[in-house]
Image (cartoon, rainbow, N blue to C red):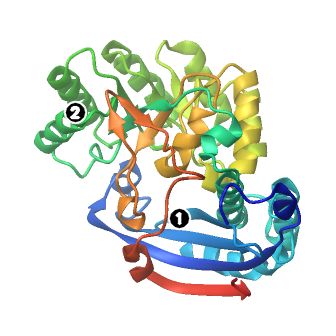
Amino acid sequence: MNASASPALAADDRIAWLRVSSCYLPLATPISDAKVLTGRQKPMTEVAMLFVEVQTEQGAEGLGFSYSKRAGGPGQFAHAREIAPALLGEDPSDIGKLWDKLCWAGASVGRSGLSTQAIGAFDVALWDLKARRAGLPLAKLLGAHRDSVRCYNTSGGFLHTPLEQLLVNAAASVERGIGGIKLKVGQPDRALDIRRVEAVRKHLGDGVPIMVDANQQWDRPTAQRMCRIFESFDLVWIEEPLDAYDHEGHAALAAAFDTPIATGEMLTSAAEHGDLIRHRAADYLMPDAPRVGGITPFLKVAAQADHAGLMLAPHFAMELHVHLAAAYPREPWVEHFDWLEPLFNERLEIARGRMRVPKRPGLGISLSEQARAWTRESAEVGQRT
């Protein structure tokens, strides 16, 4: 169905068909952050993607996704497959109502975590459909404040990367037009963290924005010491210095140091983010739309964050978050990861430190043949038109 179709027809449209798919994206190199070096997790070798495709009786289509790292992919797919029939026959424009319906369809397993991450793929697909039907990029449908957003690279700064290669990766990202560089820290030997950050700052110079991410691996005394040391490197932020749910500890660091504190990526509901915001536990809030349950709850988080005067830096999934960040009133950052690029036919444009919002309708992405080839399971409900 094209964007010029009769509004009356669209108003009468109903969901006729859905496909949920479990796709596993292999990573070329096993990925290690501080959680690996502290023995809490194994290196990451793949990302489990949950895709939802939706089509209406009149032929309008939408694509959504969620994901899981290291574990949880089969559980997300199983939950999505169970709740998918709840959407058949519904008006796809009633996104808030449908989010609640999906939540209640699986309410016995809770309103956060794996269950809402499964809902997130449906929610994103419905927003994608709505924007496509309007003939608008998602950012424009939501109400964009800008046509591009600042972006920073993470994928070149993991702890498995030797220092010499880290310097090469950082310089290459800047040369490519990416605006900032994030380095993983949180190693058992804190001197190694300091040496790596110091080397990158010296290599890139004072004008390049640098962030660090401890992935929740410091205790409070260590975080105090490391935040104090890192003050001299003029960092954009220090990310997850403490456990994701230690709101009081993060708030104390945010109050004590000039360098902003960033956290929020591990939270899995708008309610959890609300608690973090009330504690003033972050200067930069880092919600992840698939993790909180999709765009609908993400917008609730963003509204709370803006009311509190917080800066925004959504976690991962740049193909989605470039739109959501563009619709945030305060100038945000978006995390550049090239990991997901093989899954889609389109690419995001990056230049002069910024990521451009696609001009294509909806999210502006479509599944590649490679994504189909990496799909291990799929299930359909309803009848495709």
In what quadrant of the picture does the C terminus appear?
Answer: bottom right
Q: Quadrant of residue 379?
A: bottom right
For label 1, the crowd category at 10 Å Cα-Cα, with few meaning under 14, some 14 to 19 and many 20 or more, is many
* Dot 2 amino acid type: Arg
Q: What SS does tag 2 mark?
A: helix
Q: Nearer the viewer, residue 185 or 348?
A: 348
* Dot 1 amino acid type: Ser
Q: Is residue 74 visible?
A: no
For residue 219, above or below residue 267:
above
Query: How many callouts does the rendering have?
Result: 2
In what quadrant of the picture does the N terminus appear?
Answer: bottom right
Disc number at residue 82? none
Q: Image check: 347 left or right of 198? A: right
For residue 365, above or below residue 324:
below
Camera-near label (1 vs 2) is: 1
Please tell me which residue is depicted at 31% across the width and 27% down the height of the picture.
352
Percent position (x, y) of residue 104? 88, 67
Q: Image check: 173 left or right of 116? A: left
Q: Which comes sooner in the sequence, label 1 or label 2?
A: 1
Q: Is residue 27 visible?
A: yes
Q: Nearer the viewer, residue 293 or 157?
A: 293
What residue is disc 2 on?
196
Percent position (x, y) of residue 282? 61, 27
Q: What SS does tag 1 mark?
A: strand
Q: Nearer the viewer, residue 214 or 23?
A: 23
What residue is disc 1 on?
68
Percent position (x, y) of residue 319? 49, 51
Q: Alpha carbon of mark 1 to alpha carbon of mark 2: how far? A: 29 Å
Q: Image check: 15 left or right of 336? A: right
Please tell me which residue is depicted at 26% across the width and 29% down the height of the picture.
197
Q: Nearer the viewer, residue 238 or 93?
A: 93
